[in-house]
Image (cartoon, grey):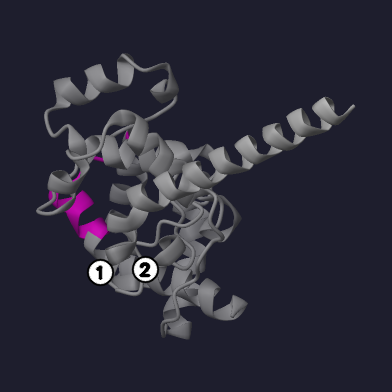
Amino acid sequence: MLALFKFSSLTAFLLAALAVSADNETNMLTGTCIVCHGDSGASAGPAIPNLSSMSPNYLMGAMLAYKYENKDDLKQAIDSDDDFQDVEAFTRESTIMNRIAKGYSEAEIKAIAKYFSEQKLYFAKQSHSQENSQAGRELHEKYCASCHEAEGKSSEGDSGVLAGQWKPYFLYSMTDFLDGNRQMPKKMKIKLNKMIAGSGKQSLEELADYYASISNSLE
């Protein structure tokens, strides 16, 4: 009986030690990320995106796109790993993230994505135009809601979380999409072009204010 108790105690100790070791490893991996993206993925800088509550597939796709700037290398990396079978990755231009991402292995990218996906959704504290946000809500429902569900708060379907995202970052991203500096899914391209054609580029400002208004209404 004493031997069984000692064995059980030892097992519990080893499991606890393994858990602590795993946490320490994750903290080491994410240490570089939180310098810019904030603790738990809650960015304090308006030009830097919040990462909290993004889906693992979305985050892995972003990191892989930064790591493999060549389209063929990116495709090969995704096709050669079963954990990436549901990942969609689209090329992105970057001056910093491409250099950072190259320093991580695929296994480390998976761990980083898992960590930030498990963090509570952060709503950036920022001002917004009420008039714009009302117009943005209509635009969201018409052009964005089918992929970015629940007012842009959902990560279902591996679309980026838009609610609470920083307005400057959102607008920088939209500019990159429209200028061709960042590739986008075919469905998004069709809807974005249709929205711009019908409502002009002002529609981007209205969407940005709408997503900011959601964060403010929940604070």
The magenta-colored residue range is 173-185
Q: Give above or below for 154 relative to 164.
A: above
Q: Which mark is residue 62?
A: none
Q: Which mark is residue 47?
A: 1
Label 1: few (<14), some (14–19) or many (≥20) C-alpha neighbours in 10 Å: some
Secondary structure of residue under mark 2? loop
Q: Nearer the viewer, residue 30 or 137?
A: 30
Secondary structure of residue under mark 1? loop
State which quadrant residue 153 falls in: bottom right
- Closest to the camera, between mark 1 and mark 2, is 2
Q: Residue at 30% of width from left, 74% of height from top?
A: 45
Q: Residue at 26% of width from left, 21% of height from top?
A: 77
Q: CA distance from mark 1 to mark 2?
A: 9 Å
Location of mark 2 (residue): 43
All told, the count of numbered labels is: 2
Q: Does residue 37 appear anywhere in the picture?
A: yes
The image shows residue 146 at horizontal and vertical percentages of 53, 45
Q: Does residue 180 appear anywhere in the picture?
A: no
State which quadrant residue 60 falls in: top left
Magenta residue check for 167: no
Q: Nearer the viewer, residue 217 or 39?
A: 39
Q: Nearer the viewer, residue 85 or 205?
A: 85
Q: Residue at 44% of width from left, 25% of height from top?
A: 86
Which residue type carries mark 2?
A: Ser
Residue at the extreme front: 2
The image shows residue 20 at horizontal and vertical percentages of 53, 47
The quarter of the image holding the N terminus is top right
Which residue type carries mark 1?
A: Ala
Label 2: few (<14), some (14–19) or many (≥20) C-alpha neighbours in 10 Å: many
Left/right of residue 206 with respect to residue 103 in the rendered view = right
Q: Residue at 15% of width from left, 45% of height from top?
A: 98
